[in-house]
């Protein structure tokens, strides 16, 4: 209510409607040229905090603008606002093309529960080669959506959507449950395989996710030291203290923490200092050409050195050529992952691949 009062005074809107906890909508007779300075002004007005029940609250606004004469004007404006927020822009104008993509994605979101229930969310495993032993003894679990109409969907096409809709906890628990079950089956076949599961940075603020994950793990009795959580360093560690506490909690229960896509984020050194990680996973953009590009080679080599001095293991991802693998061996990198070593496989095929090398070694 206090926010609305301020918006009405500064923005001259008569009726402001609340769509949900974080979304307000109103209509204005202004045209775009007049609107832009007004939006800048509204953001400026929010710079002074609100005083509510003795506490000071900061408010940040992001705007979406859509023509009022279109169908679903409010929904379009909300969509434009979320696009603006995602790209860090103060405001954005709705585009029909984006709207259609959004509508398609939205329908996908509506199908998530059915997909989880009907087993359309599946997990594939990409091998990681241990360079010290020359054996595959670990894998990364990668989610796939086997959609009955649209075919096999890659994670990049639905993970961001599910994250934004606040459903990533359910998806991650499903992936973790599948991975733990597959680990158990491999173990029965006498195969020792460590499994890494990707955890969205946003989940590190969710107490309930941590509780569910840890409960699931202890219920299955899985050996936690063979479980790794891969977390992408990102600006999304909005509340770093909470994220650190959560990672500590996972680590105390024996789970290893790996920093995924290392090198692509922003405050790399700071995170390295703060976060309780056991492993760095160097992003493929640095690894892929390290055997031919002098600059990349230098970055990868010095990162391996840095990690080893900090007592961390290093995984290099995106190895597509033999020469690249040879380079990584030469600099004492610990693990290699990439299409040259193996594409992601279903649980059965992965087991066969691991079993095959055991026979060869025996
Ligand atoms: P990521 O964690 O960095 O995973 C590695 C991605 O690189 C995978 O793509 C993998 O198939 C691909 N890749 C592996 N080797 C090579 C190579 O040699 N060359 C090239 N060009 N690519 C290679 P995928 O499976 O499409 O996954 C993309 C991203 O989706 C992952 O990146 C991860 O951030 C996210 N993701 C996957 N599964 C999950 C999940 O269960 N939960 C969450 N939150 N995110 C997931
Ligand atoms: Mg990963
Ligand atoms: Mg990665």
Image (spheres, helix red, strand yellow):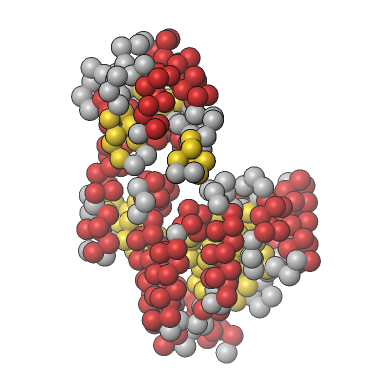
Residue at point 45% right, 63% down?
207
x and y, in percent, of residue 199 in the image: 48, 60
Identify the residue shown where x is 50% and y is 59%: 204
Q: Is residue 252 above or below residue 232?
A: below
Q: In front: 29, or 251?
A: 29
Q: x and y percent of residue 334 in the render?
A: 68, 69
**Residue 148 as seen in the image, left or right of residue 87:** left
Does 358 sit above or below residue 23? below
Q: In which quadrant of the rendered image does the N terminus lie?
A: top left
- Which quarter of the figure is the C terminus placed in? bottom right
Residue 317 seen in render: no
352 or 45: which is nearer to us?
Answer: 45
Residue 82 makes an appearance in the image:
yes
Q: Quadrant of residue 8?
A: top left
Q: Position of residue 147 (x, y in %)?
A: 27, 54
Residue at horizontal 44 percent and vertical 31 percent from the top: 62
Residue at figure coordinates x 23%, y 17% from the top left:
69
Q: Residue furthest front?
A: 54
Count of labels in the image:
0
Task: Tell whether 43 sits left or right of 215.
Answer: right
Q: In the displayed structure, does residue 152 sit left or right of residue 284? A: left
**Snapshot quadrant of residue 253:** bottom right
Where residue 55 appears, as percent x and y from the top left, is 50, 44
Image vertical order of residue 285 relative to residue 172, above or below: above
């Amino acid at each position: 209510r206090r926010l609305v009062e301020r918006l009405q005074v500064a923005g001259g809107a008569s009726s402001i409607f609340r769509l949900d906890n974080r979304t307000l909508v109103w209509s204005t007779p202004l045209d775009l040229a007049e609107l832009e300075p007004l939006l800048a002004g509204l953001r400026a007005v929010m710079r002074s905090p609100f005083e509510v029940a003795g506490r000071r609250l900061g408010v940040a606004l992001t705007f979406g603008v859509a023509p009022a004469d279109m169908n679903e004007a409010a929904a379009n404006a909300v969509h434009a606002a979320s696009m603006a927020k995602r790209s860090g822009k103060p405001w954005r104008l709705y585009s029909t093309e984006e709207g259609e993509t959004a509508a398609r994605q939205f329908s996908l979101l509506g199908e998530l529960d059915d997909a989880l229930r009907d087993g359309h969310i599946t997990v594939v495993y990409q091998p990681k080669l241990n360079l010290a032993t020359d054996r595959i003894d670990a894998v990364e679990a990668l989610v796939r959506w086997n959609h009955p109409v649209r075919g096999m969907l890659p994670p990049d096409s639905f993970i961001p959507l599910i994250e934004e809709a606040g459903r990533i906890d359910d998806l991650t628990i499903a992936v973790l449950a599948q991975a733990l079950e597959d680990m158990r089956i491999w173990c029965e076949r006498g195969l020792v395989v460590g499994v890494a599961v990707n955890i969205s940075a946003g989940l590190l603020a969710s107490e309930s996710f941590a509780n569910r994950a840890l409960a699931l793990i202890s219920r299955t009795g899985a050996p936690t030291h063979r479980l790794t959580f891969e977390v992408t360093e990102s600006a999304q560690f909005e509340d770093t203290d909470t994220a650190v506490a959560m990672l500590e909690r996972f680590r105390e229960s024996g789970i290893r923490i790996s920093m995924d896509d290392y090198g692509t984020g922003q405050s790399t050194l700071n995170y390295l200092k703060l976060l309780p990680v056991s492993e760095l996973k160097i992003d493929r953009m640095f690894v892929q050409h390290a055997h031919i590009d002098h600059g990349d080679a230098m970055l990868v080599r010095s990162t391996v050195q840095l990690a080893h001095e900090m007592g961390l293991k290093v995984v290099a991802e995106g190895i597509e050529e033999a020469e690249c693998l040879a380079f990584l061996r030469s600099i004492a990198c610990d693990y290699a992952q990439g299409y040259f070593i193996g594409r992601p496989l279903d649980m059965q095929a992965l087991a066969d691949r691991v079993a095959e090398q055991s026979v060869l070694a025996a």
